[in-house]
Image (spheres, rainbow, N blue to C red):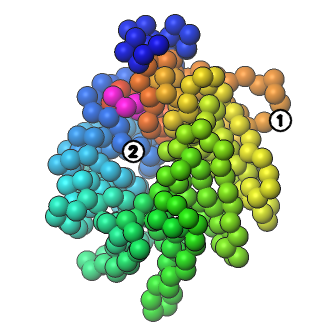
Amino acid sequence: MTAEALRQNPHPQGHAETQLERQGLTIETGAPVTVALAMRGGVAAGFGDGIVRFFRPDKPPVTVKAHGGAVLDLVAESETGAVLTSGDDGRFLRVSSDGTIAEIASFGTRWVDCVAAAHGYIACSSGRTAHVWQMGETTAQVFEHPSTVGGLAFDAKARRLAVAHYGGATVWERGARRWKSSKLVWKGSHNAVAFSPDGKYLVTAMQENALHGWRLRDKADMRMSGYPAKVKSFTWVGDAPYLATSGADEAICWPFDGKDGPMGRAPAACAYGGKQLCTAVTGLVGHNGVFAGFSDGSVLAGRLSTDETLEDLCVKGSSGTPIVALALTPQGWLFVGDDAGHILWVRLGGDGA
């Protein structure tokens, strides 16, 4: 069945509209969601038309026109309660939920691809270059790389900045006088990047249908492959913790406990989508639940457990349009965004796990 036919008859073999959908706020924005994340008090989302929207419990969404083109990346800035955004209009911005926009830097016709923030430091990338500012400073430190930056991430204390690029990643460590670089080598193109919550591992999503990771103390390689599609979404969940990922017919969750993490171990899985491809995931560290969005527009909630009798819960029914962004707040508010700009903002029961 074609996507168009599925839109006309949304769930002939998929999932019907749920009670949660009927209870939640639904919006048609007219522009695809590009990125979404939980932040102080709610969720912030970027869209293909340059708009940033702030979703908060029991309040109307706040809409801010931030960029002249698409919002390419977005990250929360805990010190200010604002978000940092990048765009294909060459601007690196600080956007507040009251509508205030402050330009941090402009790169002219060059896209600002990635952004990062943690503990008094902010960063963005344009082309092969990462730019890093300490809070309150107007001059950035500039770090060059061998190819276009595919992803940026600070560790929790902003002692290290990871930069993904072709051929692996570079980790910049902040010293008393300067930042020192260390190379992590693996053939191929590396995109989104993240430190594990304990800071012991670094993981990248590759252009190929795989993830790659390194144990940072000895640079040991960790191959996480076997996906039928590219991993476009990953997040840390559970008490192991696990790295939950898209790219298969269910959420694939790699364990990162112990001294070896996922090395030599099979991943767990939950939220089985049948013939549908998982396109987005979200969850919370410390809670063994995963929310998985699928190519038919459905969203399932699954639980990481050895109890095979536990069934997945359908949160959102099939619509025919792929889910591209999910975000969950610690208070149990779930944001769902699809490739056509349809939004669901809903309060879940219990603790959201």
Residue 82 in the image: state x and y as whole percent. 34, 55
Magenta-colored stretch includes residue 339: yes
Residue 314 occupies quadrant: top right
Is residue 23 visible from the viewing direction of this image?
A: no
The residue at 79%/51% (across/down) is: 265
In which quadrant is the C terminus drawn? top right
Residue 211 in the image: state x and y as whole percent. 60, 53
Q: Is residue 118 left or right of residue 47?
A: right
The residue at 55%/80% (across/down) is: 182
Up/down of 264 relative to 28, above or below: below
Residue 84 occupies quadrant: bottom left
| Residue type highlighted by circle 1 | Thr
Tag of residue 321: none
Magenta-colored stretch includes residue 45: no
- The dominant secondary structure in magenta is strand
Which residue occupies the extreme bottom position in the image?
A: 177
Task: Say which of 107 and 283 sits in front.
Answer: 107
The residue at 83%/35% (across/down) is: 306
Q: Is residue 316 left or right of residue 34?
A: right
Residue 91 occupies quadrant: bottom left
Which residue occupies the extreme front position in the image?
A: 187
Q: Is residue 287 left or right of residue 117?
A: right
Q: Write down the residue under mark 2.
A: 35
Residue 197 in the image: state x and y as whole percent. 63, 60
The residue at 37%/23% (across/down) is: 26
Magenta-drawn segment: 336-340
Q: Write down the residue under mark 1.
A: 306
Is the Cβ of the residue at disc 2 closer than 8 Å to that at disc 1? no
Up/down of 88 relative to 29, above or below: below
| Residue type highlighted by circle 2 | Val
